[in-house]
Amino acid sequence: MSRSDEVAHVDWRPSATPAALRLRAGVNAAIRDFFARRGVLEVETPVMSRAGNTDPNIASFALEFSGRTDGAPRTRWLRTSPEFPLKRLLAAGIGDCYELGRVFRDGEAGGRHNPEFTMLEWYRLGVDHVALAREVAELVVECLALAGRTATVRETTYAGLFEQVLGVDAHRDGVDVLRVALGEVVIDPEGLTRDDWLDLLMTHRIQPAFAPDAITIVHDYPATQCALARIREGDPPVAERFELYLGPLELANGYHELADAREQRGRFLRDLEVRRMRGDRDVPLDERLLAALDTGLPACAGVALGVDRLLMAMLGTSRIADVLAFDFARA
């Protein structure tokens, strides 16, 4: 085959239809209007950082800068979310703010994942995770209207959901009980923790049953799944965290934000230890975030929402390529 024949056979066309791309533009405009009406400031933060994401379940892209660094590291990391610089802005007194932009995650490519995708992240001062989750639901309802759709909103605790659907105590039942609750789903148990079994129950037994035209808010997670959330003491203690689903698709993950720099550093270091045990690459801690937390993060809640996921749910497709101008295979 000649070079001209090869070029002729390359599929140069977009992976999304014109209608899907127009819907994306409409959703972007609706998001900005939603926040303008509420006085939430749009900001832009760096895509490249000296620090990476320590989360053992997220892989960051790294690149090498060839110019002058004045002694700073040449290795820079593409952001997996804008969370850390947004929190630095909050500590500097910017107030309620949001960012709508591209983020990057290595190793995530397939039917539902693209290595670069669009994330909406925002922070509200003086509210908790439950109040913020309700605001997320309001935004999703407004976006759905662009596609002529409506949705009911259901709110539940993590423990209440597991009890209702599976008869399982998500905070206290042991791994043996959780494995039985998984039913006929066959999973290799090697190396799985209790939280892994809970995640499997959520993804294989609970999420698939969510009604397609229902927004489900799940809040107050086990303390072992705190991520960057505050832990509320009690019996049992819970992480002040929420996830929001449209039908069976998870759209958003939010927290009543941790403001303790010492605790945050400890969580980062525990992440790195897990990464080392797995043989994964170390990533540098975000010392600027930790310094901002030490100075003082105002009481706030924050959330990240996957815009591509939202568009997939709106269009009823399981293929992320259907909502991207050019997916990973055509980029």
Image: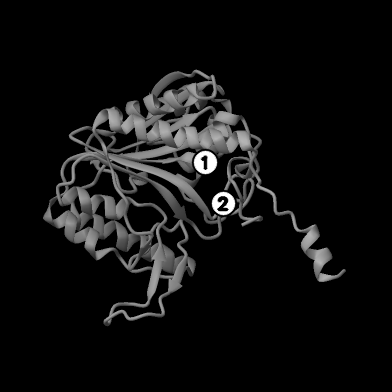
Which quadrant would residue 331 be assigned to in this image?
bottom right
Query: According to the image, label 2 marks what residue?
Result: 114
Q: Is residue 305 above or below residue 211?
A: below
Horizontally, is 209 left or right of 232 in the view? right
Residue in the picture at 57% in, 25% down: 209
Residue in the picture at 45% in, 71% down: 63
- Mark 2–mark 1 Cα distance, whole angstroms, equals 9 Å
Horizontally, is 7 left or right of 96 in the view? right
Number of on-image labels: 2
Residue in the picture at 36% in, 35% down: 32
Return the x and y of residue 50 as percentages of the image width and height.
Answer: 33, 68
Residues at discs 2 and 1 in contact (Cβ within 8 Å): yes
Of all residues, the one furthest to the front in this rendering is 4
Residue in the picture at 64% in, 46% down: 111
Q: Quadrant of the N terminus?
A: bottom right
What element does badge 2 sit on? loop
Return the x and y of residue 192 as percentages of the image width and height.
Answer: 51, 52
Return the x and y of residue 240 as percentages of the image width and height.
Answer: 29, 37
Q: Nearer the viewer, residue 306 or 263?
A: 306
Report the disc number at residue 308.
1
Question: Which class describes the residues within 10 Å of circle 1: few (<14), some (14-19), or many (20+)?
Answer: many
Asked whether residue 181 is in view, the answer is no
- Residue type at mark 2: give it: Asn
